[in-house]
């Protein structure tokens, strides 16, 4: 609970999108290079290798997948409902992005296998995205809470892929009566579940999308820089 303040949520959303974008871009660049080599390369080992993997591919591709998973975990732990939910976007971005790389590579001679893989990857990424947009398109671009963990109006009570169930504290209630009106204080008043939902305003959209856009731009820039340097 000590990592649940608004600064932690904003930083968690930024860090998760930055790390995921960095890892996915490196994976995309590495995969595109391998497809350009015919779809196969190897590095190391006691055998003679016909097609040697470039240094950037051998270095970044094995690290990109666990790095992407770590980015999703960061978003779940720290963002906690604030911002564009990486948990809902990671799978579609991964498969639609790699599907696009396969389809581009299918234009080369003998690229029928790349074409088949590209179609399968697009379907695997596009169908979950379609279901998410149909269920709650606003939540996919805004999140379910603001930076202070106040839920947005119109968010349903049931958990979804973007709103995992969170443990709730046992409230310590201090109820008093003033002029016949009961008031509640203590932990029960601080529980986000007891807060009045807010209607998303322009500032909520700007902060949510702005944090993601800045993180994505920085991740793409550094990934291309590092890949070219290696």
Image (tube, rainbow, N blue to C red):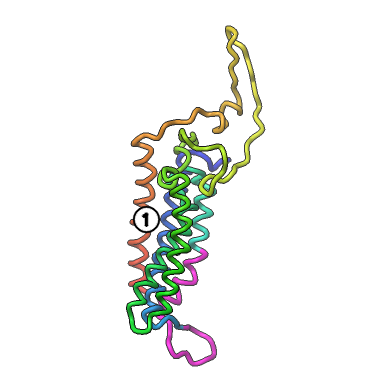
- Please report the residue visible at 36 percent of the width from the left and 80 percent of the height from the top: 36
Q: Residue at x 49, y 46 (%)?
A: 79
- In this picture, is 190 found above or below 118? above
> Which segment did they paint magenta?
42-66
- The residue shown at (45%, 41%) is 7
- Residue 45 within the segment the image draws in magenta: yes
Q: Secondary structure at mark 1?
A: helix
Quadrant assignment for the C terminus: bottom left
**Residue at x 37%, y 42% (from the top left corner):** 207
Which quadrant holds the N terminus? top right
Classify 114 as above or below 197.
below
Q: Is residue 61 magenta?
A: yes
Residue 28 drawn at (x, y percent)? 40, 68
Image location (x, y in percent) of residue 89 = 45, 54
Instruction: From the image, tell me which residue sits under label 1.
Output: 216
Q: Is residue 39 left or right of residue 170?
A: left
């Amino acid at each position: 609970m000590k990592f649940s303040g608004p600064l932690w949520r904003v930083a968690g959303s930024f860090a998760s999108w930055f790390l995921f974008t960095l890892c996915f871009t490196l994976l995309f660049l590495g995969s595109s290079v391998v497809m350009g080599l015919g779809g196969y390369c190897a590095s190391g080992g006691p055998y003679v290798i016909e097609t040697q993997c470039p240094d950037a591919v051998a270095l970044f591709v094995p690290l990109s997948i666990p790095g992407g998973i770590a980015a999703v975990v960061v978003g779940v732990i720290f963002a906690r409902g604030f911002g564009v939910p990486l948990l809902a976007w990671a799978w579609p971005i991964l498969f639609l992005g790699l599907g696009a790389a396969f389809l581009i590579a299918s234009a080369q001679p003998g690229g029928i296998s790349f074409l088949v893989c590209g179609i399968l990857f697009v379907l695997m990424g596009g169908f979950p995205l379609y279901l998410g947009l149909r269920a709650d398109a606003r939540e996919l671009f805004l999140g379910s809470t603001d930076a202070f963990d106040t839920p947005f109006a119109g968010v349903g009570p049931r958990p979804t892929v973007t709103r995992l169930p969170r443990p709730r504290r046992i409230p310590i209630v201090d109820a008093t009566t003033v002029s016949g009106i009961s008031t509640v204080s203590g932990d029960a008043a601080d529980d986000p579940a007891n807060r009045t939902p807010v209607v998303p305003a322009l500032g909520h959209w700007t902060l949510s999308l702005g944090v993601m856009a800045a993180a994505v731009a920085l991740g793409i820039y550094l990934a291309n820089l590092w890949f070219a340097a290696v």
